[in-house]
Image (cartoon, rainbow, N blue to C red):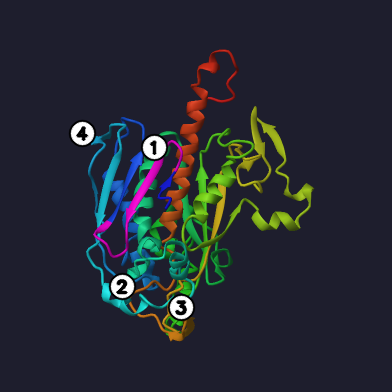
Amino acid sequence: MFNTFGTIFRLTSFGESHGAGIGGVIDGCPAGLLLDEEFIQAELDKRKPGNAQAGLAGTTRKEADQVKFLSGVYEGRTTGTPLAFFVENSNQKSGDYAKLAETYRPGHADRAYDEKYGFRDPRGGGRSSARETVARVVGGAVAQLYLKKQGINIVAYTEALDGIYAKDFGDFSLETCEKRLFFAPNDEVISHWQERIEEVRRELDTHGGVVSIEAHGVPAGLGEPVFQKLDAYLSYALMGVGAVKAVEIGAGTLAAVSRGSQNNDTMYYEGGKLCYMSNNAGGIEGGISNGQPILLKAYVKPIPSVAKEQKTVSKQGENVNLSIGGRHDICAIPRIVPVLKAMTAMTLMDMFLLQKRMDNHPMDNCMGKGNNF
């Protein structure tokens, strides 16, 4: 089972939804980074069960999600050695899953796990549970601390819930979106989302949505032109989050229905500075960052745990009807928002360190360097 993400900046996560807790080991983090534990905890609080920003969309499960660093820190700074951490599980109700041990839940990984491993932990999905993303948020928060020192800032927000788009209700204000309910980019859409969530809850159902992630201050030159393209790596990172079913970069699918003259980001000089007329490429050309903001969208499927009765099968080959109880979100958004932000941050930091290593290669003494990382 692959549990590690990254090439130089690497996160290995461990733990299950109903085990002792979730933890991870971060390797490759440079020494001397001021580890702002208040910032890291604040990022964790944005995704924890029962957080205020999730509103009516969130689960009733309550977890403190207090992170504890076990190694790799001295006097508040990273030492360059493995940075280990742990977050305790304290509010499991494993009994809610007793009847699911022999029944496959539609839309979940239950049957796929049995086919692959022949054995699984049915409590909350085990490793396939979204609770595993606790470790990703910690890793991403550490990456954000590093990226901020390089002038790179990442913002993530909810663009749509159940087909209701924020852009239809007012202008975006990204400076404060992470403080609003649902990580909304404007105030006007919030009441419409609340009404829809209440409606879906009454119907014993769930829904999906769209999350946008923007990275500002990314220098030109990150990514490779062939097999480690920046857009490919970012897509891989976001698609590695369980509920994500599609990713767009820049204009995304709209590029397929536009003309080349419309989709191209034309350039001009102003005051000696290179400028672009648009950003349909989403800040990435030829797999390499071009200095424009990186624009990403992740399309999130509905939570598969629904209280409505559905048809499924048992391990014994029987046809059964299943209604899933327990404590579940109505929508993965907004709790998935800080997770997607974290995956973006870890990807960019990894790419930044890869480029830095290339720039410091001994051959640099006899070959021209293309940038100033």
Q: Earlier in the sequence, mark 1 or mark 4?
A: 4
Please name the residue that numbered disc 3 is placed on.
195
Q: Secondary structure at mark 4?
A: loop
**Residue in the foreground of this view, choosing between 348 and 7:** 7
Image coords of residue 262 (percent x, y) = 76, 50
Q: Residues within 10 Å of mark 3 (few under 14, many from 20)?
A: few
Tell me the number on the disc at residue 146.
1
Q: CA distance from mark 1 to mark 4?
A: 17 Å
Please name the residue that numbered disc 4 is placed on.
75
Q: Earlier in the sequence, mark 3 or mark 1?
A: 1
- Give the extent of the magenta segment: 6-21
Q: Earlier in the sequence, mark 4 or mark 3?
A: 4
Residue displayed at 35% across by 75% down: 101
Q: Residues within 10 Å of mark 1 (few under 14, many from 20)?
A: many
Q: Secondary structure at mark 1?
A: helix
Image coords of residue 345 (percent x, y) = 45, 45
Q: Earlier in the sequence, mark 4 or mark 2?
A: 2
Q: Give above or below for 124 relative to 284.
A: below
Q: CA distance from mark 2 to mark 1?
A: 34 Å
Please name the residue that numbered disc 2 is placed on.
60
Q: Give above or below for 212 relative to 223.
A: below
Q: Quadrant of residue 220?
A: top right
